[in-house]
Amino acid sequence: MLRNPFVLNGYIGKEYFCDREHEVQKLLEHISNGVNVTLVSPRRVGKTGLIEHLFHQKEVEENYYTFLIDIYATKTIEEMVAQMAKSILSTLKSRSEKALQSFSSIVQSLRPTMSFDNLGNPSWSIGVGEIQSPQNSLDEIFRYIENADKPCIVAIDEFQTISEYPDVKAEALLRTYVQHCHNAQFIFAGSKRTMIVEMFSKHSRPFYQSTTIMSVPKLDIEKYRAFAVSHFEKGGKGLSPDVVDEVYDMFEGVTWYLQRVMNKLYMLTPTSETCDTHYIPKAIEDILDENQMAYEALLYQIPSRQKALLMAICAEGKASSITSTAFVRKHSLSSSSSVQSAIRGLLDKELVTSENGAYEVYDKFLAIWLNR
């Protein structure tokens, strides 16, 4: 058992994963029936964990090769192709030398190189510099997938990123390969709802109506309550159900924040003691203190008008009509035009999110820290 069962990063195993039975079942149904899926949720709700949990289902492990490719940090199609190849290599190296050699023999344009660490373990790498032609490299990658001795499930995380590449043909190019790949089902996951839904629902876009669209809802509070209480009990500690309810409401049921606070509460609760709601302020305060230097540096780096607007949105919680005269006057902002410019900067930096015309601070801990 882990020292702290409330995992914050990565996928450890089914024991430390809460619920999502319905979503896993729906994904299995779509995949087994040859349907590609667009998976949509805000960041930190748990779509990546859901994909990894799906990949660890017995029927998936026994019958499919699975690849999870995160392209969030990529800026060009060349970087995306390199990330695809790296992710496939990383997965194959844990399986068999035969699978690894098969990939290397087909994907020759990238010239994957092998080196050894201090313990003599092999490490494969691919650099963007090796990509002379993204189309040729994609051709080889998809040829490998098409010829694999098992069907594949390929999940591309933060898929909306490709719509921001300088190469406007990237989306159409990838759609062509996906369309002609018969040995794989694809999961296109994204956290920017408007962008990714438009990619699959707008008539002029290459991926138009090529998938079924699934949303990832917030965790069911009753199931998360049972999950949290159970893990406290396994660690010889008690947990008042009211604690889960209060934390769930405070962070609107967003998975990562629930896990972060429960991780801290578990840490603060001595063995044989029971965690009640009196522990919550201390847990939040500790988390804010741990982040303080990063938050101070962040505020120092952003322009004054963006900072003023960030504070205004934070004060509102969820802010609408931010360019209105009433909002500008209420928060002593410069002007409506300066607000328009500032909000673009905050959205680009992903400090603020927007949904249905309402803006809020993305990092909920930052929002609490700013309001202290």
Image: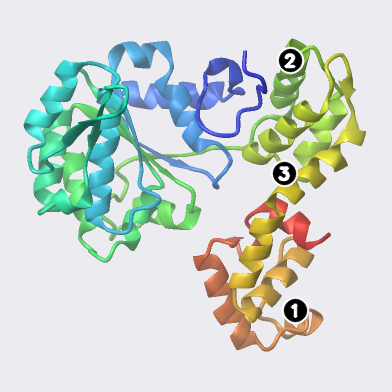
Viewer-nearest residue: 69 or 190: 69
Mark number displayed over residue 252: 3
Element type where label 2 sits in the image: helix
Q: Which residue is mark 2?
A: 230
Task: Give how far apart the Cα atoms at labels 3 and 1 are.
Answer: 25 Å
- Please tell me which residue lies in front, 10 or 214: 10
Question: Which residue occupies 74% across, 64% down?
Answer: 314
> Mark 3 near mark 2, Cβ–Cβ under 8 Å?
no
Q: Residue 112, relative to residue 306: is it above or below?
A: above
* Numbered label attached to residue 327: 1
In the image, residue 39 sits, relative to residue 275, either above or below, namely below
- The image shows residue 124 at horizontal and vertical percentages of 23, 33
Which numbered disc flags the more N-terminal residue, 3 or 2? 2
Cβ atoms under marks 3 and 1 closer than 8 Å: no
Q: Quadrant of the N terminus?
A: top right
For marks 2 and 1, give the CA distance: 46 Å
**Label 1, residues with CA under 10 Å away: few <14, some 14-19, many ≥20:** many
Element under label 3?
loop
Q: Amino acid at mark 1?
A: Phe
- Give amino acid for label 2: Ser
60 to the left or right of 258:
left
Horizontal and vertical percent position of residue 229:
77, 19
Residue 16's image quarter?
Answer: top right
In this rendering, does residue 222 appear at all? yes
**Residue drawn at the location 31% of the way across and 57% of the way down:** 203
